Amino acid sequence: MRIQKIVAMGATLALAAVVSGCSSGSTSASGSKTVNWWTWDDKQAAAYQVCATDFEAANPGVTVKISQYDVADYFTKLTAGFVAGNAPDAFQNSVQFFQAYASQHQLLPMDSYIAKDKFDLSRFSVGVDAWKYTDGKQYALPLDWAAAGIYYNDATLAKAGYTRQQADSLTWNPDDGGTLGKMIAHLTVDAKGVRGDQPGFDKNNVKTYGYGEIAAKDFIGQTTWGPLVESTGWRISDKESWPTVFNYGDPRFVKTMDWIRSLTDKGFAPKIGQFGDSVSDIDLLSSGKVAMESAGSWEAATFVKIPGLKVGIAPMPYGPDGKTRAVLSNSNGNNIWAGTKNPDLAWKWVSYMGSEACQSKASLTGTFFPSIPASMDASAKALAAKGVDLSVFTGMLKNKELIASPVYVNGAALQAAVEPLFQAYFAGQKSDSVFTDMQNQSKTILAKK
Amino acid sequence: MVTSQGNHTTPVQPSAGSAGAVATTAASQHSTERRSSAQRRSAGPKHNAPTRSAAARRKDLPVALLLIIPSVVGFAVFYAYPTLRGIYLSFTDFHVLSPPSWVGLANFRELVHDGVFWHSLWVTLYFVVLSVVFGTLVSLFTAVVLHRVTRSSFLRGVILLPFLISNVIAALVWQWMLDPTLGIINIALKDVTGHSILFFGSGPWAIPSLAAISVWKWMGYYSLLIFAGLQTIPETIYEAARVDGAGEAQMFRRMTVPLLRPILVMVVVLTVINSFQVFDIVQVTTKGGPANASNVLQMYIYEKAFNEFDFGYAATMSLALFALLITVTFTQLRLARANESDLN
């Protein structure tokens, strides 16, 4: 009798320990008056803190908690949060994961709030449509827009005999590379000081590459090969929303890739993987490893502020017809989690972040371009006064040179399937027949539910 | 220092207190324990039957149950349940956020036709072969050197140091040292040969680099095991061999290695299992790249589950790995007759 009691007690205790051990993990959900907001960008986390302070002042008793997690872990952590029930009330999201989350009912549709508050979506000049799901509902407010430009070492270009005007009006084609190709060859210098277009150039001992890491595994190529191949009229997908195929097999695309691989073969641009992940675009230019490179618009302020180095910004080159520029622009979205305990408060914060007041203030840091034109102008003006000239990017917006990034399904699977093939191609392990294979794979993956 | 041969035939534990033989007992226990428990089992009924009645044993049952509850609960909650659920999930389409839906053998059909899976399997096997061959050789060599050359326990401790570092830190430090532009190894290589090597950035080098880190990391541990095994070999055998005129190399090949067989088998089995499960050093350094060159099975499973949220298919692959590991381990133990020693 007594022993049985002890057994029962022991079992209960053990069970209680197990149960409490399990539950203690998920009690950290948001309190009643706290809005949790996540981003993967450390600079934007700091930028939006300004808005958070204003929002807290306008709504007494409300705390906004901004958290930042590195992009490599961000989406895994977010998903874990959905499962455990402690995801943030609202968060920055990329179109790559939009469908995955929306189809599993993790995102809150905003239409009822938009209607109730008479929130005017037309205040955003870009990115609204990217966040409409297949059910026609609006799932996010666009947070920003982005483009790509060419950043160059001003002194190196001057020494090589190039003017700013020349840099601003480069042309490119996949056959001989146009004026961009010539410039890249001339800017490349080997260890003995011989330029890439001079006899005796040693491609195995390059001191300064003429161009940055354009042979990249990135499957969209937004800041690398994208603007070049898009200037030929090529588009990555058959349609903008929910495409069925990515056009990797197109002859224009294949030709562009061949040209890019010829750059690395000639020693004019670093080979894939030559610089580890720890070396950023900024490091490459500031250390003099490259003379110029294409990179994201969100890096403009950081590039310009490199100490002791004058960095110029040029637009992407004109395409083969000599007058077309095309740069892919994506917009990250501000989502509300469907499981939030305070949807009203979360909407209040998200809609405040989507206001001109917040966007103008936060974008002063130059770490992102607001989707609201008035805010964009305000921050461009303020940054120009600080010596950061964004006219290259605002020009793209005004001249309608931006093309919208597609919204597609199964982004993570697509990335996992295609990136190794890009790596293999640029490493010389596969011929350009790999692109037909890529196109077929994209078809299969985009067709998956 | 020398453990007498007799210890292995009698079911008595070797006296742990015998001078400086801490490591010795660790290893000899391994063989004696198995031996003695086997003998106890066969001797058990004869021994116990007269003194203990069935009723008395039944009275002990509740206490016995109480005593095993903690480990049973732990086993059930953290091992049995997840395993069964994993097996169940491998027959479903499961994306974490919505409940799993039964798809029968669809995942297994996908597995058979998944080129990346088979590629990953080969990559993993390549890693295993490199780790096992070089790991065992390096550990054996280190252990023999330790045994024949030094008596310093400080040196023996130093050899173990890499094992005390976590895998992630070992991988990070090696990644820095092997960095193509900033790493000390590549700077040295560039000075000597004029070329640097993309240890993690080029397909042919990725797996050998990872295997080298793994061998370095585990070398100390395995040499300590082998070292302990060496200490169980009676010195008298070597004396006899020396009298017969055998050289050091001959003694090593004809005596040390055969007599170490049970320990070596254990080391090989452990290395195989360990290497099949390699994940952390890959995740820290190459993340499976470049071009899937180091996409080992665990990495691919992780990628499918936690990046693509395809948990059903990831569970299927885990099950395949599980079956594979069981087969490999049992075959190894069978072939190597690991539960017998040649010392008797």
Image (spheres, coloured by chain):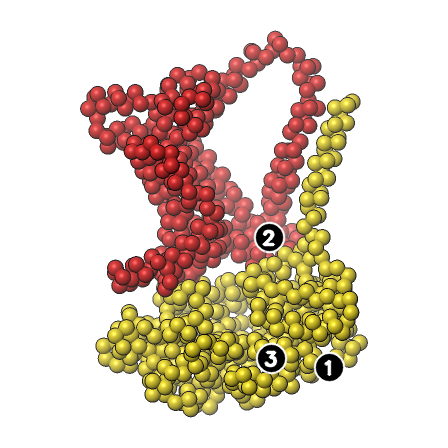
Chain colours: A yellow, B red
Q: Is residue B221 visible?
A: yes
Q: Secondary structure at mark 3?
A: helix
Q: Which residue is mark 1?
A: A120
**Label 2, label 3: how far apart the Cα atoms are:** 46 Å
Out of B50 and B122, give the one closest to the viewer.
B50
Residue at the spot 73% in from the left edge and 39% down from the top edge: A16
Amino acid beneath label 3: Leu
Measured as percent of width and height from the top left, residue B323 is found at 51, 42
Query: How many circles with numbers are drawn on the protein?
Result: 3
Out of B74 and A410, give the one closest to the viewer.
B74
**Label 3, label 1: how far apart the Cα atoms are:** 23 Å
Is residue A124 shown above or below B62? below
Q: Is residue B112 visible?
A: no
Amino acid beneath label 2: Gly
**Label 2, label 1: how far apart the Cα atoms are:** 42 Å
* Image position of A171 (left or right of B61): left
* Image position of B93 (left or right of A196): right
Q: Which class describes the residues within 10 Å of circle 1: few (<14), some (14-19), or many (20+)?
A: few
Residue at the spot 36% in from the left edge and 22% down from the top edge: B2
Measured as percent of width and height from the top left, residue B256 is found at 31, 29
Is residue B238 shown above or below B117? above
Q: Which residue is mark 3?
A: A364
Q: Label 1 lies in what chain?
A: A
